[in-house]
Amino acid sequence: NELIPRLAEKKNLKVQVSLQTLPASTSFVTTLRFHGLRRVELGALLWVLDFGGRKFHRHALGMGKPFGLGQVGISVEGQLLRSNDPNENLQGREPEFLLACRHEFIDLMDQIVGAAKHTTTWENSAPIKVLLGQALPSASSVDRNYMPSPKDFVELRRKNRLEELKET
């Protein structure tokens, strides 16, 4: 009976987790340092952080995702960049440089998709559309069907039936 281990977990304080939430619109500032990135790699990093400049898309972080918690928007502000090329001065041109890097990344991805003979752009491809759909706050994780137990996922993976998890 699965109920008996769950009752034991409720009594065992060592396995319990305390979830502490923050008020909506809590803001954090941090510094992101990197070295030696090519322009296209910097463009990829920027795209991943803010989903290609989409202001309303969110990353899902932390343990409260099944409850709609942990939705984090990331924006890049206050850039201080130094080029790998000592002859290139980016001071005062950071926003334009970062935009060019984003475009280089998207252009590269479009070339890869085109070389595979697909008839769509990279950002309009099915995997990216699913990613962007999942990153919308309106796609509340409360509306998603979570498996009741991690053991259920392991069992599907063991039987090579993970396609059953795809959204309909």
Image (tube, rainbow, N blue to C red):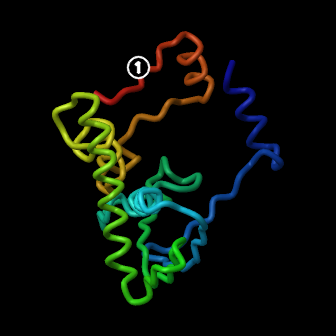
On the rendered structure, is 11 left or right of 32? right
**Front one among 115 and 151:** 115
Other residues around mark 1 within 10 Å, as few (<14) / some (14–19) / many (≥20): few
Q: Position of residue 99 (x, y in %)?
A: 32, 70
Q: Is residue 108 above or below residue 78?
A: above
**Quarter of the image where one finds residue 71:** bottom left
Q: Residue furthest front?
A: 87
Circle 1 SS class: helix
Q: Identify which residue is drawn at 74% across, 42% down.
A: 10
Q: Position of residue 89 (x, y in %)?
A: 45, 84
On the rendered structure, is 161 left or right of 4? left
Q: Identify which residue is drawn at 73% across, 26% down.
A: 4
Quadrant of the drawing holding the N terminus: top right
Q: Residue furthest left?
A: 119
Q: Residue furthest bottom?
A: 92
Q: Position of residue 81 (x, y in %)?
A: 50, 79
On the rendered structure, is 149 left or right of 25? right
Q: How many marks?
A: 1
Q: Position of residue 59 (x, y in %)?
A: 44, 57
**Quarter of the image where one finds residue 12:** top right
Q: Identify which residue is drawn at 41% across, 19% down.
A: 163
Q: Is residue 7 above or below residue 128?
A: above
Report the amino acid beneath label 1.
Glu
Q: Identify the residue position indicated by label 1 in the image.
A: 163
Q: Is residue 165 above or below residue 14?
A: above
**Front one among 164 and 50:** 50
Q: Identify which residue is drawn at 62% across, 65% down.
A: 20
Q: Is residue 53 above or below residue 65?
A: below
Quadrant of the drawing holding the C terminus: top left
**Front one among 100 and 150:** 100
